[in-house]
Image (cartoon, coloured by chain):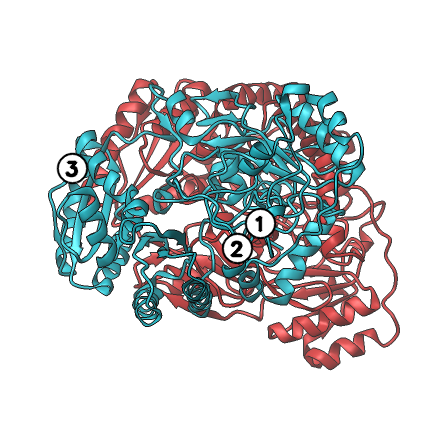
Chain colours: A cyan, B red
Amino acid sequence: MALRRVLGLGAALGRRGCCSKRPLPPDFVEALRAVVGDPNVSTAMAVREQHGHDESMHTGAAPSPSCAPPDAVVWPQAVGQVQELAALCYRCRVPMVPFGTGTGLEGGVNAVQGGVCFDLSRMDAITELSLEDFSVAVEPGVTRKALNGHLRGTGLWFPVDPGADASLCGMAATGASGTNAVRYGTMRPNVLNLRVVLPDGRLLHTAGPGRQARKRAAGYDLTSLFVGSEGTLGFLTQATLRLHPLPEATAVTMATFPSVRAAVACTVQVLQAAVPVARIEFLDEVMAGACSRFSGLELPEAATLLLELHGSRHGLAEQRQQAEEIVRLNGGSGLAWAEEPEERGRLWAMRHSAWYAALALRPGCQGYSTDVCVPISRLPDVVVETKRDLQDSGLTGPMVGHVGDGNFHCLLIFDCQDPAESRRVHAFTQRLGRRALAAGGTCTGEHGVGLGKRALLLEELGQEGMDTLRRIKAALDPHNLMNPGKVL
Amino acid sequence: MALRRVLGLGAALGRRGCCSKRPLPPDFVEALRAVVGDPNVSTAMAVREQHGHDESMHTGAAPSPSCAPPDAVVWPQAVGQVQELAALCYRCRVPMVPFGTGTGLEGGVNAVQGGVCFDLSRMDAITELSLEDFSVAVEPGVTRKALNGHLRGTGLWFPVDPGADASLCGMAATGASGTNAVRYGTMRPNVLNLRVVLPDGRLLHTAGPGRQARKRAAGYDLTSLFVGSEGTLGFLTQATLRLHPLPEATAVTMATFPSVRAAVACTVQVLQAAVPVARIEFLDEVMAGACSRFSGLELPEAATLLLELHGSRHGLAEQRQQAEEIVRLNGGSGLAWAEEPEERGRLWAMRHSAWYAALALRPGCQGYSTDVCVPISRLPDVVVETKRDLQDSGLTGPMVGHVGDGNFHCLLIFDCQDPAESRRVHAFTQRLGRRALAAGGTCTGEHGVGLGKRALLLEELGQEGMDTLRRIKAALDPHNLMNPGKVL
């Protein structure tokens, strides 16, 4: 995504100021250089600014954006260096912010209290690939596309796909998921072990050093605790991942429906019929129209489902038949199935262009993506109410969703130079979050809490839940040095 | 399982004494009665002894078994009572032990420091069943068979099956799994939310109150933290579970192989071919022979796989064909496929009788089940070495395993009145645990740590891992009142 930091919008989107920034101690930068060498430390403003934001509009800035960049950026080359750097920061009580590809959407990397940004992109080893165990270990510089490139020809792949070519360790830190989660799960069940550098520099293997058993019942599940911890408990410096066999055959189709309700009913029935659907993506009629114009595919402006099936050649035929029948039962009309990579690519390119197609609805404006997830049974009501709210608020917000999981995004396209519209966007996102909570859902299905959703998180978890999170944070990061100001 | 507490064996199986037991404060039992009413509190020795052990041989007793029973047993009828009772225990610093069905295998319910046993079996509501969302909420008195009975006719089921008809909240507390985990996962991915009574009586909903979204990225994953916490962090008083569609058709077969290695190679290839196998269970030749004699099925005494496939009628035919081909490629010879419930039941009854078949190998002796899990690629070596070790140790220990997950059990059958043999069993279990660790595995795939595996857990996680567990325990249970002496 090309979307970049838009100054001053953080406040409008619910971020609270947390700039208790202190200058680095004297000679501290020299001490960093002593660990990683001169060329691997930078205090240049351009570099710091580049590391002070992700792809969202959160600046971490209140009232000015000046505290979002870190005070220094370091590029450790090995886990031992991460440990030494962390121990140094810990001794001097300097905040630490992990940085992967910077493709987050909730301001997770913004250095709201300054400190040192650890850019881990140069640690990019892929090791311990085991074709028999379906496992591999990756360092933070390895993106999901790089891993799948590495796996080419092995018959295995890593299916979690949040859209962006994110760092796999970053995806673990965010608890990412995306289009394939309905079949293959989110990051959590696909991480077997994490090598974590703790705030004081000690090394923790969440499932024990060198372990990669497919399941375990040995003590608290530290792996799941660090997945989704958004850099607030430690640095994820290696993730051991669970791989999956590549499907023998893949087929994609697109179906349009008379209503949102019909599209969702179709989804529920597909799941109930145990059709092992790999992706089932929803576009509302505004999004379908925008994608149609943007991609030149001439789609009907109607509630749309994109379905992908994985299976054996033989099994796929049956899955297709089942899916078609359920689509028809719900008043849907489908296109032909695309089986060849090129055709399938064209359909997914259309879906993946949703962000740009949405931006093209109002040239010159910015975008912000909401991320609620609700029980599927509540999805039609929540979507219909949300569409009414968009209309009443005078906002542009086409919808896309991982409908098999009940997770959908409004891509809000607005003029951030217009304070009144920015306020309406903020008020809308809060209402949407609360609507999802009232429906038994969550304010974030896959983007994480970061800066923007801390207030909603309290409403979601309640006082006891927040107190429990805070106790865990205080137990593992007693001086609040790891990515301070995020999540909690 | 009929196996009951065998006095004095705990020490031989690696349990450490932890009997810092203090008498209950004066009038404390009266205070308990004031909360739940007279008939719901007992201090009768028979009742306390019944609640002082699970189905394993761990007594929690060193040097005598007398400290395993709790000082009192209470039967709360509602979550509010659990809260009041916990608050009372918390104020008086009295240890608390949650109790479900008592079907654990690692001494998890033994009251090694005395205190109050909370028997939660009378809280047995099944609520919030949603057929569209594939979810349901169960209280601790609901067992997996009771839930699946309740679901009859809905087209949905809860697949996690550890063998025993355990409480579902207890299965969550243990991080249980069993035969279906290779397809449907362990308890962890199948729990959406937990209603927890914290040690001080406060109520925590791990995913927020009333929430049942299929996925979330909102703060640390408290649900996964409490799954597998073995009662050491709080009482699981309700679990919201993820249900699955019942398969349209099911087929089971059994195949015998020339060697362990061939059976495991077959398993890996079945998984690599993406055959969505629902169960794939291994029996070594000793176990197959014992089961053969016990069940009268006349099986060959050879390394054996039991395979179960779930799918549509049509899809099943293809899965069968694929599986048969892979079995043949690995030198396996198979029986015919059983598709009718009765035939399938007969095969699984044979597998489920493994424990009794093993006991029948040495009438009058006791059994203890090990529980290591290793990466599948290491399974043949670990199994072969373990068989040699059994022979060298002069021990009887037929093997069964959830081989698709790399998890196998030696069912050690020994005379616990013979101190020398008991010592050999203890030494063997330690060596087996260490062998699994050396192979990148875990000392417990599904039974939990309880009393018996605390020493191995340290070796598995290392000092940093244990320190992290201890910090979390201290943060959430600062006075060490929840099931003290377990896991840590």
Q: Quadrant of the C terminus of chain B?
A: top right
Q: Residue at x 49, y 32 (%)?
A: A241
The label shown at residue A137 is: none
Chain for disc number 2: A
Identified at 63% across, 61% down, the residue is: A466
Is disc 2 on the same chain as disc 3? Answer: yes
Do tag 1 and tag 2 residues touch (Cβ < 8 Å)?
yes
Q: Secondary structure at mark 1?
A: helix
Regarding residue B235, the answer to whether it shows in the image is no
Crowding at dot 2, Cα within 10 Å, few <14 / some 14-19 / many 20+, comes out as: many
The chain letter for the residue carrying disc 3 is A
Q: Between residue B88 and residue A474, name the one nearer to us.
A: A474
| Residue type at numbered disc 2 | Gly
* Residue picked out by circle 1: A65
From the viewer's perspective, tell me whether residue A260 is left or right of residue B22.
left
Q: Which mark is residue A10?
A: 2
Kind of residue indicated by mark 3: Ala
Q: Residue at x 50, y 51 (%)?
A: B217
The residue beneath circle 3 is: A338
Q: Nearer the viewer, residue B457 or B214?
A: B214
Residue B421 drawn at (x, y percent): 73, 30
| Disc nearer the start of the sequence (1/2) | 2
Residue A408 sits in quarter: bottom left
Q: Residue furthest front?
A: A417
The chain under label 1 reads A
Among numbered discs 3 and 2, the one appearing first in the sequence: 2
Label 3 – label 2 distance at C-alpha? 42 Å
Q: Nearer the viewer, mark 1 or mark 2?
A: 1
